[in-house]
Image: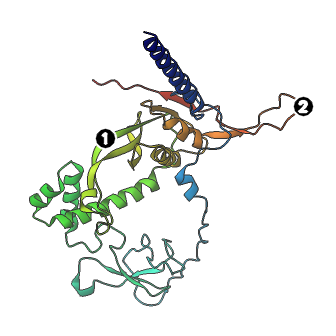
Amino acid sequence: MVITQLALIVMVCVLVGQVVRGWSTGRASRPLGPGPAGHHHARTCKPECPACLNEGHVVEPPPRPTPRVKKKAGRPRTVATDWHFCPNRACSHYGWVGLGNIVANGHPNGGRWRQLHCTVCSAYFAESTATIFYRSRLSPDLLGQIITALAEGLDLQATARVFAVDPNTVKAGLVKAAEHVDAVSRYLIHDLHLTQVQVDELWALVQSWGEEDETPPGARRGWGWVWAGIAPDSKLLLATVVGERSLRYAQLLIHAIVLTLAPGVIPLFLSDQLAHYAPALLTHFGHWVEVPRRGNCGARPKPRWEPLPELNYAQVVKRRV
């Protein structure tokens, strides 16, 4: 009887000790980052954004060259080439349009596209250079129909069967079209004065076509997260990011959205209560605040990284219909 009572006392003491240790460990290991969704706490260091770190080195573009003087002698040229530029990166007129350095040079071998010539670096290039039609075996009309079918949701293999072309040709056209759409979007969508921005993540099937030789076949197709930012008023898609559901990709999404906004514009952000959005917004819409001293003794308090007063951060819970 005495042994049983002693055993019970020992068990109670062990359980109480485990509870006390677990409670104290939980209190000590509680993170000091942002609190619950919708609340910001001041930080002594700015949250890092991988996109902001890569943009630390700004390359100044070269000055605009002097336009070429057109020759008055000879037959006047009738082909308009003012909207073409030299693709040779070593040329001093690379990337500049309307300088008069590009002239037409006929159709080589009776081909579809005209040949152009740069009078500065003596480079020859096709009229379709830097477009989705460059070195494509398909006609522009057929390639446009294929891109339209893919945009409507038709599968890649099904598109190849419908238009009687090779699936690799369809894939190459889709990759080129996606690259051009991304470049055109970054060129057109900027300096927006928005009042609201909605951010969300979608669990979708994603297939990677880049670096297929180095990527294992089993890793090219799988489920992943698609991050998206949209203007709810105009339904304009501002930015998309494909990756994991982590703070890194939340930072990349907010960074891409900030690039589309006009300077000084801070819209109302709506989300699905994901905790990663709070530090991501705090990174791009924060500022350093000096903390006043409470007494004459001791070290001066470190400055705090706090959200801007104009930042309106709202958490919206989406209900499933």
Residue located 24% across and 61% down the image: 217
Residue 39 visible to an observer of this rendering = no
Q: Is residue 256 above or below residue 176?
A: above
Q: Residue furthest bottom?
A: 74
Residue 221 at x, y = what percent?
25, 54
Residue located 54% across and 24% down the image: 23
Residue 236 at x, y = what percent?
39, 41
Residue located 47% across and 90% down the image: 73
Which quadrant is the C terminus positioned in?
Answer: top left
- Read off the residue under disc 2: 296
Q: In this view, does 237 lie above or below 95?
A: above
**Marker disc for residue 203:** 1
Frontmost residue, 74 versus 101: 101
Q: Distance between the residues labelled 1 and 2?
A: 55 Å
Q: Nearer the viewer, mark 1 or mark 2?
A: 2
Asked which secondary structure carries label 2, the reply is loop
As shown in the figure, which amino acid type bears the numbered disc 1?
Trp
Task: Estimate how packed mark 2 is, as few (under 14), some (14 to 19) or many (20 or more) residues with alpha carbons within 10 Å.
Answer: few
